[in-house]
Each structure stands twice: as structure tokens, then as C-alpha cells.
Image (cartoon, rainbow, N blue to C red):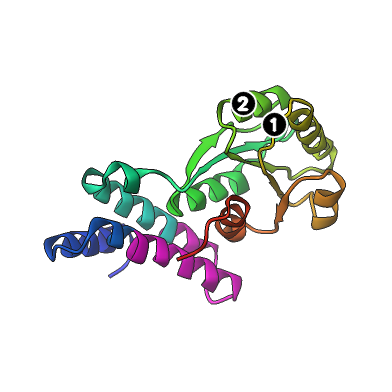
Amino acid sequence: MQGKDGVIELVEKALAEDIEVGLILKEGLIRGMDEIGRKFSSGECFVPEMLVSAQAMKAGLKHLEPFLKGEEKRKMGTVILGTVKGDMHDIGKNLVGMILEGGGFEVIDLGINTPVDKFVSKAKENPNAVIGMSALLTTTIGNMKLVVEALRSEGLNNKVVIGGAAVSQKFMEEIKADAYSRDAAKAVAIVKELLGIKSV
């Protein structure tokens, strides 16, 4: 049993057996995504499997939503995603967004070619959100630094994670961002760490 249909069938079976909704969410769906993230990190599975798993997780969450109480329904946290100004690439960003949603996060997608002030205004609206920036071109990475500087000059303390082919751990340290994600699969673990959320 695999994919969206398999997850929905298992959720329905668990509900029929009167298993607590919060337990289905934490021990079934979230634990499942954590395990896929671990397998990706160790090379046991790859991007296609991550995508299928994220889509299955979203389907399971949607099916479970009517049964969730307010406390359980609350997302783990919010992530503001955007490709920086001057960069029109969005495949990596979209993949990260899907995986984060599958991992239980609310994602605010600012799209491509995102100006500094758009990141700042969304951060003001969501002061506890993590900001994720992507850049594929070396000519655009300077805009990441501008975003971090603008956030700090506005007194905003949102955690900032960067990713994309043009950036590195060293660059993250140079611009004083909070984390660097080398690949999409690690995004959930990194965001959880930044928000102080323990994996189940």
C-alpha cells in the first residue's frame, strides 16, 4: 500500500479502530515523514520518494483535518519561502515547500524574483516564522545579505535559512543567516531545529 490512497486507507482504518486522532497524526503521519527524511539523508531513498511521501502526508492531513481539535490542528510553525530578487528559478523552492507542508508546516510562498521589502513585510506579519531564501545564480546571492540586513535593521528576529546551488555554509556564515540547507530533504529537520521542535 503506497502513496496518497494508501495513507488515506490507513487513516480511515485507524479512525475506525478508535485510535486517538492526535496519535494518528504524531505517530503515523509525522513519524512517517521523519523516517523518510532520515532515509533520504542516509541515501536509502531519493527525491522522487520524498515527493511521493510529502504528497501522501498532505493527503493524510487533509483527510484527518475534520477530526482534529484546535490544538492538534495547529501547524508546527510557519515558513516564508521565496527565491531572491533577480532569480527566476523555483523548482528547488517548490520542492522544499511541498516537503515542509508534508512535514506539518504552514508555507507562505512569495514566489520568484522576490524583493527585499516583500520578505520584510511578511516577516512583520509573521514574527515567529522561519524565512527560507533560495538562489541558483551567483549574481543574485547578494540579495540574501540585503534581506538579512533589512530584517535586523527593522528589529525582526526571524530565523533565516538559505539554500540553492549558488550558496554554501561559508556564505551563510558571512551574511549572518541562521542555517544552510544543502538539499530539500533536510529542510524539515533544519526548520524544526531552528524552532526548537523535537522530532517524534
Is residue 59 shown above or below 35? above
Q: Residues within 10 Å of mark 1 (few under 14, many from 20)?
A: some
Instruction: Find residue 83 and report its image quarter.
Output: top right
Q: Say which of 156 and 180 sits in front.
A: 156
Q: Which residue is drawn at the image coordinates 36% and 61% (left, top)?
A: 26
Query: Are the residues at dot 2 and dot 1 in contact (C-beta closer than 8 Å)?
Result: yes
Q: Residue at x 13, y 66 (%)?
A: 17
Q: Which residue is mark 2?
A: 124
**In the visual, does 55 lie left or right of 41?**
left
Q: CA distance from mark 2 to mark 1?
A: 7 Å
Q: Which image quadrant is residue 160 in?
A: top right
Specify few, some or many for label 2: CA neighbours under 10 Å numbering under 14, 14-19, or 20 or more: some
Q: Position of residue 56 (x, y in %)?
A: 36, 57
Helix, strand or loop at mark 1: loop
Q: Position of residue 154 (x, y in %)?
A: 74, 25
Q: Residue at x 76, y 45 (%)?
A: 177
Q: Amino acid at mark 2?
A: Lys
Quadrant containing the C terminus is bottom left
Locate the N terminus by quadrant. Answer: bottom left
Instruction: Name which residue lies at 75% across and 31% down.
Output: 86
**Magenta segment includes 108:** no
Task: Please name the predominant secondary structure of the magenta segment in the image.
Answer: helix
**Amino acid found under the numbered disc labelled 1:** Leu
Q: Quadrant of residue 42?
A: bottom right
Mark 2 lies on a secondary structure that is: helix
Query: In the image, which residues are magenta?
Result: 26-52
Q: Which residue is mark 1?
A: 156
**Residue 162 located left or right of residue 190:** right
Q: Is residue 91 above or below residue 5?
A: above
